[in-house]
Image (spheres, helix red, strand yellow):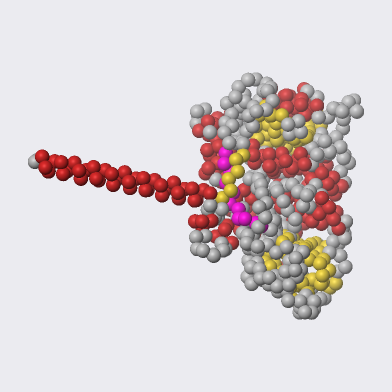
Amino acid sequence: MKPGERSKLLRNLRQESRRFRLLVVVIGFFLVTLTFIVVTKPEAILFADVGKKPNSDEATSSIVIEERTSVQRLDEIPRVGNPGVDASVTDYNEGTEVKGENEDNSPTKIQRNIAIQTKEEERIQLRNTIGPDQFGNNNGNEGSEEKSEDKKEEVKHKVTLPTVSNYTINDSIDTKPDETTSTEVVVLQTNEQTEPTLQAKSSTKHLCDFTNFRANVCDMEGEIVIHPNSSSIFFKEPAGSTRDEQWKIRPYPRKGDDFCLSHTSEITVKSTQTPPQCTQYHDVPGIIFSVTGYTGNLFHDFTDVMVPLFTTANQFNGEVKFLISDMMIWWVRKYHRVLEALSNYPFIDFKNDNEVHCFKHVIVGLHAYMEFTIDSKLAPKNYSMVNFNAFMRRAYGLKRDSVTVLGEQPSKKPRLLIISRKRTRTLLNLNEIVEMAKDIGYEVVVNEADVSSRISQMAEVVNSCDVMMGVHGAGLTNCVFLPRNGTLIQIVPWGALDWISRIDFGDPSTQMGLHYMHYSISVEESSLLEEYPRDHEVFRNPVAFHKNGFDFVKKTFMDNQNVRLDVKRFRSVLLEALDHLTP
């Protein structure tokens, strides 16, 4: 190659090299800028059209809020028992926790898709919640022999359903009219999950409140006409009123769970000056709610219906009538004592009633908050779970309001109830646990709560005991019948399930005024050792399995795991529970 050609080639290569470096810099700057925009201002991408408001469907899956939740706590009280044991015991009332050395304590990110609910920058902390035994394997009064075949078929498919942990909330609009200001709304369009499109007019509060992330509720006072055959409720407007509202509501508190609500009838609430002619008049308020959805599982019977119904209805001291949508007779018979304790009147089968009813006060839907809890700041009359616990004891005529102080009756031993499961999360060494408990001074009762259990009989058994223990599952819902200052011990299977367990039973039991103890089993106490080698990721990093979704977690750690308690380790837990019975 000639010298001139070589120098020309070198110059070309340098120029190409500079162009390439410049291109890399430009592309890198673009990627960094794009990443910054997506992370800090998602609306700039999601709603790029100037002046375009995000509709509710877009908002549903657009905004992701990430919350860090520690699966285990690290900086707590020193270990008890043998060193190196992979287990933790937490006494929620004392605020102490005992950790093993080999436990995976890395935090896990729990993503929740929620839409902005109001123009106020109100931080709503949604707790990831997956009901125990949800959608199957329900040990603990979860169901009835009177269920139809259709109901059984639904349960088979519930394993794939969304839960409150990934609720999408579509109740977002740019401006929420203040109820006290001089604005009235004209509803242009609405659907079950979306707050109506509003147009400013004149003055009054709206018929319905769709701002709660868990449940939509319509609370109306005035001339209200209920026409069950058309699934319609009419609010009679006075002459001259220009209000024109129409709302669609499914009165079951699992807002955002489309599969669940697809089995619940939709009710139309609207304002009109010409409602149908009444055939029956009522001088007490009416509450309309559904008992379909996930009922049949004891936990969901309470978190979805019983607790919300108490919160909504107890304020009326029995002077209220229930209109039950999507009636299931077996469910009403099972919980008739609760319904009768809340209402002095026969219920009305909403879908099969031919009358046109007139009320002066109607509530459609039930006030609901977090799982199996009551938000006393928002609830009518500031009700709390302590009130609910006391109400359940009264409803079933239970004798003990509080536990027996140790030594108060020298001849009487403290009673320990062990909730025994049959199919999954079984206590493999139950007999050994019973003998150990007897050795340290307990009178032990073992109860296999299943679908054939009568709720009244179970309530009496639970109330007769001072301490109740069991592996995470719906059967622990029976803690609502424990006397005040009783103790609940929850045994948590291997698999980073602590956050689920604490939300389902830890927080609720503490709010009821009970002592709560949290025992996370070690690897050696899990039957998973029979299926996986000790160095498998299921033991090294169980949190990683949660990335595959709840169905996978349920199949791996709930449906296919049993527990063999280390009785030497667990002995200290039962001894500590005895301390709660001392004055």
448 horizontally vs 580: left or right: left
The quarter of the rendered structure image containing the N terminus is: top left
Question: Can residue 416 be spotted in the picture?
Answer: yes
**Residue at the location (54% across, 65% down)?**
51
Give the number of marks.
Answer: 0
Q: Is residue 316 above or below residue 93?
A: below
* Whether residue 461 can be seen here: no
Q: Along the line of sight, which residue is nearer the eye, 576 or 348?
A: 576
- Percent of width and height locating residue 322: 80, 62
Residue 334 is situated, as x and y percent measured from the top left of the image, at 77, 53
Image quadrant containing the C terminus: top right
- Quadrant housing residue 448: top right
Is 509 above or below relative to 261?
A: above
Residue furthest top in the image: 82
Q: Position of residue 513 (x, y in %)?
A: 80, 39
Compare residues 572 and 155 and report the one nearer the observer: 572
Does the magenta portion include 381? Answer: no
Residue at point 82%, 50% (across, down): 382
Magenta segment: 108-118
Between residues 14 and 117, which one lies in front from this camera angle?
A: 14
Relative height, residue 321 to residue 565 (above, below) = below
* Residue 109 is inside the magenta segment: yes
Residue at the extreme left of the image, as rendered = 2
Viewer-closest of 194 and 289: 194
Classify residue 206 by image quadrant: bottom right
Q: Position of residue 47 (x, y in %)?
A: 52, 60
x 77%, y 22%: residue? 439
What residue is drawn where x is 73% and y is 31%? 95
